[in-house]
Image (cartoon, rainbow, N blue to C red):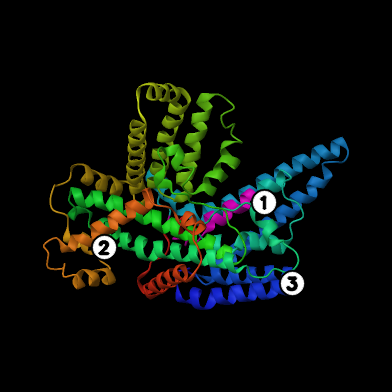
Amino acid sequence: MLFNSYIFVFVFFPICILGYYGLLQTGRIRASRAFLTGMSFWFYGYFKFSYLLIMVCSIIGNYLFHRLLSSEEQKTGGLHSEAGRARLSRKGLLVLAVGFNLGVLFYFKYFDFFLSVMNGAFGTDFVLQGILLPLGISFFTFQQISFIVDTYRGEVRNCLFDEYALFVSFFPQLIAGPIVNHSEMLPQFRIPGKRKPDWERIASGFALFVLGLSKKVLLADTFGGGVDYGYENLTALGRADAALVILFYALQLYFDFSGYCDMALGLGRMLGIEIPVNFNSPYKATNIVDFWKRWHITLNRFFTKYVYIPLGGNRRGEGRLYLNLLLVFFLSGLWHGAGFQFLVWGMLHGVLYVITRFWQRHLKKKYDKNVVSGGSGIGTKIMTIVSQIATFLYVSVAWVYFRAADVAQANTLLRTAWKGEIRKISPDLAKCLQPDEFWYVIKVLHLDNLSFSRYILMFLFLAAGLYLSMIGKNAQERVARLKYGPVSAAVSVILAVWCILSFSGVSTFLYFNF
């Protein structure tokens, strides 16, 4: 089920919020958790019932591992020999549990890719299985791995099955994150006693949901039309067309993913549950390290805690530090998709990340000292702006490999943008960024007779997208400063109605594919 669908807005969520608060007000905490879990199963199973069966089996299997690890932990405090055997047993269980999760993920997401690589490398003719990827499997698999590892470390105790089932399946963050931690969510699911709706919190959540929905429906999908046209007509693009397609995708992905994250936060808040922030204006970053502190924050947190630090982090010398960072970005690329283009994308980020960390460790202090002694406040601001623009352009170029069907297609688009034919921007590309309601405004203003009228909306959308992503306040900041009253309520309702009327032409979220 999509957030941006009629059944979700008019049927699913009204039933969910009324039933949940209704049970809470009667003091039936476990019943409210069970209800929310059942609604989450409905939400996920609505896409395809087989997806739900896979997720439920994964939940049951991982909870059994959790219980086994918890029971073995109690034995480690006994006699020395028994404690030693228990520690070995727990480590074996941990390896088995993590292997179970990675095995399931490998089968559904990477098995066909593995077979195709084998066929290409060794000339074999293995038949690809055409395995359908269950939505969100990368997200809930990593979430469960983190839970199992934390259980092994003794950080999780006395987790009931209904708490765990809701922790994994909670519908706002189930399909596209964030990858939440047990310490963030379980305490909120365990709050005892009665809980009445907090109307100011619900209003804040609704405003955040509507802003996220607007990003998706009014901006992301509009840019997506231009992106789809560009990738479907690569040979017909000129240099300017290709450059615009690259920018359009960078903005489409930004508004699509940040829109989903805002909607997830808003839905959770309306239910009285705070979901961690996963997205914090990444295109305002002035370097790639800063970018990864802002983009997909919880994935970065996962790799840092469960991969980078166990590998030694920065504690085993500088060479090992950079190797660990490159491995993390290799795994990040692989996590996002089964294809060489994702590995290229990951390594483009990884190489620049290593270069930036080297700069920060060895050269930045000397550079900053020279700037302070010989520069000015204006010069520093200019360098900040230049750094932000350069980071955005680098990330945008790397996104080409993220979007392309393969490395060859990505290279073709980049080659066209670099040295393609210089000619007028394609009117067909511009037409893709002309939603009917906006084109109607152009007609009302009698601008449609101008020779450049077909390009007006395209450049207005581009300017708006760049401003909102690189300069303006993000949705969380706007909602935090929002003064609730008739005006704000009217604006939220108008945006919501506008988005709902546009549902018929809305696509799924891009991160559903990962």
Q: According to the image, label 3 marks what residue?
A: 28
Name the disc covering residue 13, or none.
none
Q: Amino acid at mark 1?
A: Ser
Hey, which quadrant is residue 314 in on the image? Answer: top right
Does the magenta-highlighted stretch encompass residue 177?
no
Q: According to the image, label 1 marks what residue?
A: 183
160 left or right, relative to 168: right
Image coords of residue 39 (percent x, y): 60, 71
Pick the residue in front: 150 or 187. Answer: 187
**What residue sits 40% from the left and 65% below the top?**
214
Q: According to the image, label 2 marks what residue?
A: 433
Q: Earlier in the sequence, mark 1 or mark 3?
A: 3
269 left or right, relative to 331: right
Question: Badge 3, how many Cα within 10 Å: few under 14, some, many 20+?
Answer: some
Q: How far, Cα to Cα, is label 1 from label 3?
A: 23 Å
Hey, which quadrant is residue 275 in on the image? Answer: bottom right
Image coords of residue 51 (percent x, y): 54, 66
**What segment carries the magenta color?**
127-147
Q: Is residue 380 visible?
A: yes
**What residue sits 36% from the left and 72% below the top?**
502
Image coords of residue 213 (percent x, y): 43, 65
Q: Earlier in the sequence, mark 2 or mark 1?
A: 1
Q: Amino acid at mark 3?
A: Arg
Q: Is residue 123 visible?
A: no
